[in-house]
């Protein structure tokens, strides 16, 4: 009613105004006519004023009724309010459910030749541009990325190194490496940016991998990276596996209470890797991306899969992303992340909904197991995230060609004489030892598929140890003993480095793994310690050294298989010779599984 009455008054006002115009003009002529008496003139003026006042009153009433109409729509007129409220609710709920179409972003990013391989039915949810825009939380310095992109545009064939763990390897994706985000991303790179060999024939961008799976083991086996002849882009994916590093035997100073926390250990090893990569020339400065592809799902799960009381008393709930964010920001390393938006999406309606399979963004749907490990569709999403961010950087490169770049914005680490910021976590001795002058005098790397010739002559005695890959894909090599009775022994001749340190790396797992003993002496056969290899070990964990023999525990309760690194108490003086002994002890009934395995990954002396 107020709306209708207001409209009526405005209409009346306009009609009166239009009809009064000729009358007003006639009145004006009469007033100017000298033949009209003064009294008549006064009456005409008053009539004109009355017309103006009435018009103003009608306009005021119309405005008041209009305001009343607006007020009524908000508090008094339920039908109109209810329609608007329902519309708002519908609009809000539209964002809760994924769009039926999953093709929009695919059409834009994926070349036509790859669209049949994208397997859209495997995508867990519709990937939108608003999601992908959130995937670059740290822009960093793009100078190195631009060098890489210019190589792509000049049709130069490049090499891309993926440094990561089981997520990068496509574990539990029903296809492993052939169903992993590195495979999908490299397929896209080769189709989007075809390259040419020196003879102008069609070439391909090459995928490089290591056999390591976290920052610590990449630090230990750095030679697998340094021996790569050419390298253009490195993608580091340690968000999950770095959560399992709980010791830092390489520190050369007392790090205080913080030094024993997983968070500090993670940033310490990652800083060393970043500084090494920034100084690497293969032959050009290498482009670096920190990629947060996944998160540990069970950390966010309700009981019995997790302990919320314990988890809420941790800083980041075993999520390494904030640490990677911090380091990437300080070193201006571009950071790409899928978990930065997927984890909030999964849990924004509560913990139970996060693991409800009716939730399209559910952690249970994204992961293939209780730990992490995306399914095939998840790896497709991860490859889309990488591809989108690279395309956006390409747009920025071309659109900012005329932008003014201040000197401070330059990447000084990419110069001929590189300049790095001062270390945040490394002491001067650690920087000198691990970054500037890595003084490893001897390395026996049992994970290198082609490394057997390099260390086979160091084996002096071998009783029951074999070098092979024990996974289905036959790519995870190690020196392995597996026997429930124990006693398997190997002796390696070693030469001491500058610090006299002996470092061992090996696998720990939750079932079928046992305990090994290790010591250093001057005998090839193990001397007086050898009989101890037949004694069953009842201790479950810890750093145990008894009578010159050290215990290496290959089992733990966490449902994951990860590398462990330890530095022996036994030393070998610089330039001195010695024999490193490792033997497997008998299977203990209180350990999980029926097998009794120990897998040695490498030995370093420095």
Image (spheres, helix red, strand yellow):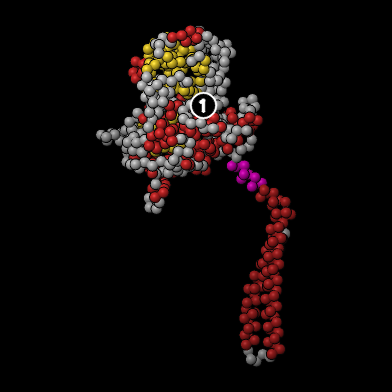
The residue lying toward the viewer, choosing from 574 and 400, is 574
Q: Which residues are magenta?
A: 86-95
The rendered magenta stretch, by its main secondary structure, is classed as helix
Q: Is residue 203 left or right of 491 when viewed as pictured?
A: left
Q: Position of residue 512 (x, y in %)?
A: 52, 15
**Count of numbered badges drawn on the protein:** 1
Residue occupying image coordinates x 48% and y 12%: 584
Q: Position of residue 22 (x, y in %)?
A: 62, 78
The residue lying toward the viewer, choosing from 28 and 222, is 222
Q: Position of residue 357 (x, y in %)?
A: 60, 30
Any part of residue 281 in sight = yes
Q: Which structural element holds mark 1?
A: loop
Q: Quadrant of residue 437?
A: top left
Q: Quadrant of residue 423?
A: top left
Residue occupying image coordinates x 44% and y 9%: 527
Residue 595 against residue 199 in the figure, above or below: above
Q: Residues within 10 Å of mark 1 (few under 14, many from 20)?
A: some
Q: Which residue is mark 1?
A: 247
Question: For the view shown, which residue lies furthest in the left direction?
Answer: 199
Any part of residue 120 in sight = no
Q: Is residue 87 magenta?
A: yes
Q: Is residue 425 magenta?
A: no
Question: For the view shown, which residue lies furthest in the bottom direction?
Answer: 35
Q: Is residue 233 left or right of 121 when viewed as pictured?
A: left
Residue occupying image coordinates x 69% and y 58%: 70
The residue lying toward the viewer, choosing from 346 and 507, is 507
Residue 61 against residue 486 in the figure, above or below: below
């Amino acid at each position: 009613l107020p709306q209708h009455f207001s409209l009526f008054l405005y209409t009346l006002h306009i009609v009166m105004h239009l009809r009064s115009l000729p009358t007003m003009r006639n009145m004006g002529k009469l007033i100017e006519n000298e033949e009209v008496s003064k009294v008549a003139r006064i009456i005409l003026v008053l009539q004109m004023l009355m017309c103006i006042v009435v018009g103003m009153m009608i306009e005021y009433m119309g405005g008041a009724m209009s305001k009343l109409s607006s007020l009524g729509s908000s508090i008094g007129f339920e039908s109109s309010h209810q329609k608007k409220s329902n519309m708002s609710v519908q609009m809000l709920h539209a964002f809760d459910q994924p769009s039926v179409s999953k093709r929009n972003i695919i059409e834009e990013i994926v070349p036509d030749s790859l669209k049949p391989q994208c397997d859209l039915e495997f995508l867990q949810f519709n990937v939108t541009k608003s999601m992908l825009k959130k995937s670059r939380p740290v822009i960093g310095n793009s100078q190195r990325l631009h060098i890489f992109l210019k190589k792509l545009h000049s049709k130069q064939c490049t090499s891309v190194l993926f440094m990561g763990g089981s997520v990068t390897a496509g574990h539990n994706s029903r296809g492993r490496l052939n169903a992993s985000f590195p495979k999908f991303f490299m397929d896209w790179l080769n189709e989007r940016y075809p390259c040419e060999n020196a003879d102008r024939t069609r070439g391909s961008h090459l995928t490089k991998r290591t056999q390591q799976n976290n920052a610590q083991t990449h630090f230990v086996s750095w030679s697998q990276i340094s021996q790569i002849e050419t390298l253009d882009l490195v993608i580091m994916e340690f968000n999950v596996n770095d959560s399992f590093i709980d010791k830092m035997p390489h520190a050369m100073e007392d790090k205080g209470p913080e030094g024993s926390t997983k968070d500090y250990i993670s940033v310490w090893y990652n800083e060393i890797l970043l500084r090494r990569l920034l100084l690497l020339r293969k032959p050009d400065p290498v482009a670096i991306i920190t990629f947060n592809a996944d998160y540990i799902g069970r950390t966010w799960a309700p009981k019995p899969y997790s302990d919320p009381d314990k988890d809420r008393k941790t800083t980041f709930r075993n999520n390494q992303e904030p640490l990677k964010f911090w380091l990437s920001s300080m070193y201006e390393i571009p950071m790409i992340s899928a978990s930065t938006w997927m984890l909030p999406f999964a849990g924004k309606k509560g913990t139970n909904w996060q693991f409800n399979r009716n939730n399209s963004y559910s952690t249970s749907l994204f992961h293939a197991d209780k730990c992490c490990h995306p399914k095939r569709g998840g790896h497709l999403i991860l490859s889309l995230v990488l591809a989108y961010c690279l395309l956006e950087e390409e747009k920025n490169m071309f659109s900012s060609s005329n932008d003014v770049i201040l000197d401070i914005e330059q990447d000084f680490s990419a110069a001929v004489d590189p300049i790095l910021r001062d270390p945040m976590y490394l002491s001067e001795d650690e920087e000198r030892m691990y970054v500037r002058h890595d003084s490893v005098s001897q390395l026996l790397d049992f994970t290198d598929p082609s490394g057997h010739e390099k260390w086979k002559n160091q084996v002096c005695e071998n009783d029951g140890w074999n070098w092979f890959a024990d996974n289905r894909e036959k790519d995870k090599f190690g020196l392995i003993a597996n026997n429930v009775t124990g006693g398997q022994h190997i002796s390696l001749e070693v030469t001491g480095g500058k610090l006299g340190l002996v470092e061992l790396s090996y696998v720990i797992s939750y079932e079928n793994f046992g305990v090994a003993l290790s010591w250093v002496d001057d005998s090839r056969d193990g001397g007086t310690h050898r009989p101890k290899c037949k004694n069953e070990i009842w201790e479950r964990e810890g750093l145990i050294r008894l009578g010159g023999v050290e215990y290496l525990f290959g089992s733990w309760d966490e449902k994951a298989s990860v590398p462990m690194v330890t530095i022996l108490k036994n030393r070998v003086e610089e330039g001195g010779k010695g024999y490193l002994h490792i033997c497997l002890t008998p299977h203990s009934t209180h350990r999980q599984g029926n097998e009794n395995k120990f897998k040695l990954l490498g030995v370093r002396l420095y």
